[in-house]
Every structure is written in C-alpha cells, then in structure tokens.
Image (cartoon, rainbow, N blue to C red):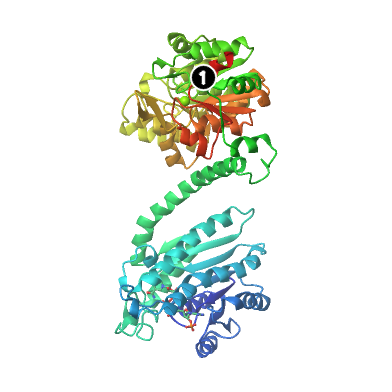
Amino acid sequence: MSSPLYKKALIIGATSGIGEALAIKLISHGSQVVLVGRRQERLDNLVKRLGSDKSSAMQFDILKLQDISTFASKVTTEHPDIDAIILNSGIQRSINFAKPETVDMSVVQEELTTNYTSIIHLTMAFLPFLQAKKTTTHLVYISATLGIIPTVLRTGGYNASKAALHHWILVFREQLRQQPDNRVKVVEVFPPAVQTELHDERHQPDLKDGGKIGMPLQEFIDQTYEELLKGDEQFGIGMAKATIDGWEKERVKLFHHQVPVVTNALKQFLNYISYHVGVGSKSAPGDPHYTMTTTSPQYLTGNPAALNEFIDRFDTFLFDCDGVLWSGDHTFPGTAETLELLRSRGKQVVFVTNNSTKSRADYKKKLDGLGIPSNVEEIFSSSYSASIYISRILKLPADKPKVFVIGETGIEQELRNENVPFIGGTDPTLRRDLVPEDYKLMANGDPSLLDPEVGVVLVGLDFHINYLKLALAFQYIRRGAVFLATNIDSTLPNQGSLFPGAGSMSAPLIMMSGKEPTALGKPSQAMMDAIEGKFQFDRNRTCMVGDRTNTDIRFGIEGKLGGTLAVLTGVSTKDDVLNGLLRPAAYVDKLSDLLGAKE
Ligand SMILES: NC(=O)c1ccc[n+]([C@@H]2O[C@H](COP(=O)([O-])OP(=O)(O)OC[C@H]3O[C@@H](n4cnc5c(N)ncnc54)[C@H](OP(=O)(O)O)[C@@H]3O)[C@@H](O)[C@H]2O)c1
Ligand SMILES: [Mg+2]
C-alpha cells in the first residue's frame, strides 16, 4: 500500500455521519485516527470496530471553550504523531427569525459557537503544535455551500455560521502563507446535502425522515477521499461541485487579486496616518511634521508680516501647476508676478506636474503660451521622473533593457533624452484590433509580437488606449516586467469637468495582474527623490505649493519638506484644508496673495 493520506488524523465530530464514515475510510487506507465527540458509547463502539491499534477516542464537548487548550495539550501529548486535524463537528437547527417569540437565543448562540467560534478556538489551540512540525501538516474544515448561497431559509443561523467560517478560512490561509516556511495546509471541503444525522428528526423534529435527504454517505466519503488525495485547497462534492468550481472559485480569484491591492492601499494609509495622528515612530510631538499637520493651517492672505516670514523660511518652492498657476487655458492673474517676486528673492522655483503626455520641452511651450516665464530645467514632469527612475535607479538585467510604453510622446521624448530604449507608445501599428493570430502569438511569447528584451512596462495617459496595448502590457508583466506608472491620478480636470486620467490606464492592468505599479508622479516619494537628486535642495528649506491636499500637500508632508502651502483656486476646498486629515502648514486664497509680501 502506498503511504497513507495522513499518518494520524484527529477527527473532531467522529461519532456519526461524515466524521465517522471518514474515520472508517482513512483506516482502510492505512491512516490512524483519534476520534472526538460527546457520545462516549459511540466512541467506544467505533474504536472496537476499527481496532484499538489503529484508533483511539477522547470524549470532548467543543462548546466548552475554556477547556479547549487543556484538551489540545492532552491530545498532542498522547498523540505527538498527529499530522492532520479534521474539524468536522457541526449542528444545524431550524429557526424562523420572523417569529421572534419562537426563537430561543441560546440555540442560536449554541449553533454559532459549535460551527464557528469553537472551530477557531480549536484551530488556535492546535496550531502551535502543527507549526512546530518539520513536515507538512493538514487542517481540514468541513464547510457548507449554505454558507455561500443560503438557499435553505429554515436554517438562517446555520448558513450564517458557515459563511463566517468560510471567510475566516480564506483569511487564515493567506495569513499562514505569509509566515516564513509555512507547512500547515488548509483544506476546505464543501459537501452537498448528505444523508447523516445533521438534519434528522432528533435535531429537526419537523423534518420527517430528514436523515434521508441528500447524497448517500458512502458515495460522498469515497469522492471526498479522492479529492483530498488530489490536494486542492477547496473543493465541492456532488451538487456542491458546481457552486465551488464555478461561482465561488471566481470570487476567490477576485479575493486573491484584491488582497495585495488592498494591503498596499492600507499600508499607504497607515504611513500617512502615522504622520498625522502621531502613531508609530515616524512622528512624535515636537517633530515639525507632527505640529505642522495637527495644528490649524495658518491663513496668510492679507497679512504681509506672516507672508514675509513664511517666504523667508524657504529657498526652494515646488509648484503644482494646474489649479495653482492656471486652470485649463486660463492663467490666474498675478501668476507671473508672483513667480518673479520669488525669483527676485533668490528662490529656486520648480514646476512639478503629473501630466505625462508632455515632455519638459512641450511643457515649457505651454508655460510660454500662458505667459509664465520659465526654463526647461525648472520643469519636473512625471514622464521625466519615470525616465530618470528607469535610467538611474532601476537596475535592469542586461538582456531586458527595453520599456513597453502605454502613453504619448511626452514619455517617449523623456525616455529618448535618457537613452532608454522603448517600444509601444505612439507606434501606429498598435492602433488596431486584435486578430485571432495575435492570441496565439502572445500565448506562445512569439518574439514577432512580444519583444523578449522588454523589462519594464511604463503606463501613462494614453489617448489611444486599446485592448491590444493592454493585452501586450499584461503579457509583459506576467513575464516579469517591472510595472511602473507615470502617475496614478484617476481623473484629469478639463473644461470644468473630469476625464480619465493616467491612473485609469494602469487600473485595468492592476485588475488583470493583481500587481500595483510603482508610481512616479505626486504623491509618490520616488518623484521627490528624483527631484532632490536633480536640484540637491535642503528639504527643511523647501515648500510644496498645491491645490490638492491628497496629492500635493501629502507629497510635501510625506517628503518631510519644511512646509506646505495650499491655494484655494483648484480642487481642495477651504473645509478640506482646515478640517481634512491632510492639512498644509499654511494657505492663501490664491497664489498671487503672496504678492502681499511686498507691502
Ligand atoms: N449532512 C449534510 O447535509 C451536510 C452538508 C454540508 C455540510 N455538512 C457539515 O458536515 C459536518 C458533519 O456533519 P454531519 O452531516 O456528519 O452531521 P452529524 O451526523 O450530525 O455529525 C455531527 C458530528 O459533530 C459532532 N458534534 C456536534 N456538536 C459537538 C460538540 N459540542 N462537541 C463535540 N462534537 C460535536 C457530533 O458528535 P456528538 O453529537 O457525539 O458530540 C457528530 O459527531 C458538519 O460540520 C456539517 O455542518 C453536512
Ligand atoms: Mg493641481
């Protein structure tokens, strides 16, 4: 006989139904078993039947939560060779929640404790024992499809308890995976209705012959055993198979895609909270960032002394452009004069823009056209930031130096300036529909369609985004290309309305790949590092000026700049500035209010 599925399995709930039948099956295939349940006589009879050399029993009531850890130590001391724990115990009760006078809340509680709470207690009590083993161990949970689609109305409490169990298992399994060297395998079994005592007349007196509902027990056990041998993490049997393989598998896939996305977003949120609420080591009372963000922003408009004092604190001003210097095609009055005032006082001015469609040279033209004097060296765009990041910071393998671009000429020009080889972008041959041949070529990684030298996918705003470009980018990312985004602004303001932004180009790829790009625009600190690399400024004497608290002001705060200044001519309102979680050090109604410093 080949080696058994488990060396020794502890079966919780082995006195009848699925647990009992599984014990018999496991023994017949060479495993040993330890049987648990409340009914001592049943346990004794089963050990007699299975043989005391292969089986043993321990009476225990899993509702006694406080005794679970003692129970676990007893079991593991007596049976140190257990390598599988099958958590099978469960009860099902019929309850009509629309008739509260008939509902016995102690029954509701008992059902939830048996099917959910005690299962977690048991898992926690046995887990250290399993984790200490040098070989693979197994936790097998007997779940229920009623926890996924609660079609049986009479068992609402049961359905909910199994739903809780399923969601807990999904998370628990991921948490285990995140442990180094995890060898504990979590398997979840979804039975269909099976002929057991679960719904017999003893437990649900109104169900005449309820024990005859469903699949014959032996048939269920034979199929379950085959599936356990295959080793899948979750599977359904009989009618439950369709639910699990079709619908639920898709939902679990979504879960796996979204976990890294949400984890990342939460990480960013916690980073930012640590600045604002003073949690963690990044900030503490006395730290300038702490005071800066928890006190009320200083209102500078019309206060010449305060304006002068503020301006004097900085050598460098980083400017967001749209909403600060101009809106759309309209330059705010006094913009050029304000910049002139700062320059005349020896301040370095830097224009920081997330717009990736334009190169710096294009941007200079735009500034010229709007009557704002500038030179190319003062301009820092997200496409420039991305190019610098690729050429100077990323260490690409020698055989994968190329960038696949989703975006416009601005990105291409900046990559060219930095001598970074690229494909895609404005290439007109990519503005077409997919043909059947493309699928085959892509699936096979054919070099005529997928350039083997691509090591980076860089995504910016692309006015000609299409399925072909997304499919190619996805294939490159799947083959290990670094995923970058010029910026992740979801929308782009224009003509007083909003349009899809660069972040909406990378969003489908996040969905497809489950990966988050490294973003190089505000508020990503990769951009701040790149700006600092170029201008060598003293962060303490640098101020970020912007109209959006969640990008511009956050960019300055997270970059630990000496100050942040909000203007109220763009996206964020006075209420955001004064009461939002991200507050600037100071604010003015409009940029040209800085001219008041002259008075
Ligand atoms: N049968 C189905 O149609 C079906 C469908 C989907 C899922 N399931 C699940 O399959 C699992 C097994 O159920 P089954 O159908 O085999 O029902 P069953 O014949 O009634 O078996 C239930 C087992 O759980 C044990 N148990 C219940 N409460 C316990 C407690 N407080 N302490 C210790 N053991 C306890 C029982 O032992 P004692 O009474 O001796 O304590 C018995 O061994 C359950 O989790 C159930 O939800 C069953
Ligand atoms: Mg802006």
**Image: 299 above or below 42:** above
Instruction: Please name whichever residue, 172 or 94, is drawn nearer the observer in this view of the structure.
Output: 94
Residue under the image location 60 percent in, 76 percent down: 66
Tell me which residue sits at (55%, 23%) in the image.
385
Q: Which residue is mark 1?
A: 593
| 338 vs 194, nearest the viewer | 338
Q: How many marks?
A: 1
Q: Position of residue 76 (x, y in %)?
A: 65, 74
Visible in this render: residue 8?
yes
Quadrant position of ligand 1: bottom left
Locate residue 289, reporting x and y percent.
Answer: 64, 35
Number of residues whose C-alpha sits closer than 10 Å to that of mark 1, classed few (under 14), some (14–19) or many (20 or more) = many
Residue placed most toward the observer, 344 or 218:
344
Label 1 secondary element: helix
Residue kind at label 1, given as amino acid type:
Asp
Above or below: residue 581 compared with residue 111 = above
Q: Is residue 172 left or right of residue 315?
A: left
Q: Quadrant of the N terminus?
A: bottom right
Residue 534, given in percent of the width and then of the height, sits at: 63, 19
Q: Nearer the viewer, residue 421 or 107?
A: 107
In which image quadrant can residue 144 be found? bottom left
| Residue 231 in view in this figure | no
- What residue sits 42% from the left and 77% below the top? 105
Q: Is residue 206 depicted above or below 398 in this figure? A: below
Q: Name the image quarter holding the C terminus.
A: top right
Q: Position of residue 435 (x, y in %)?
A: 31, 31
Mark 1 CB in 8 Å range of ligand 2? no
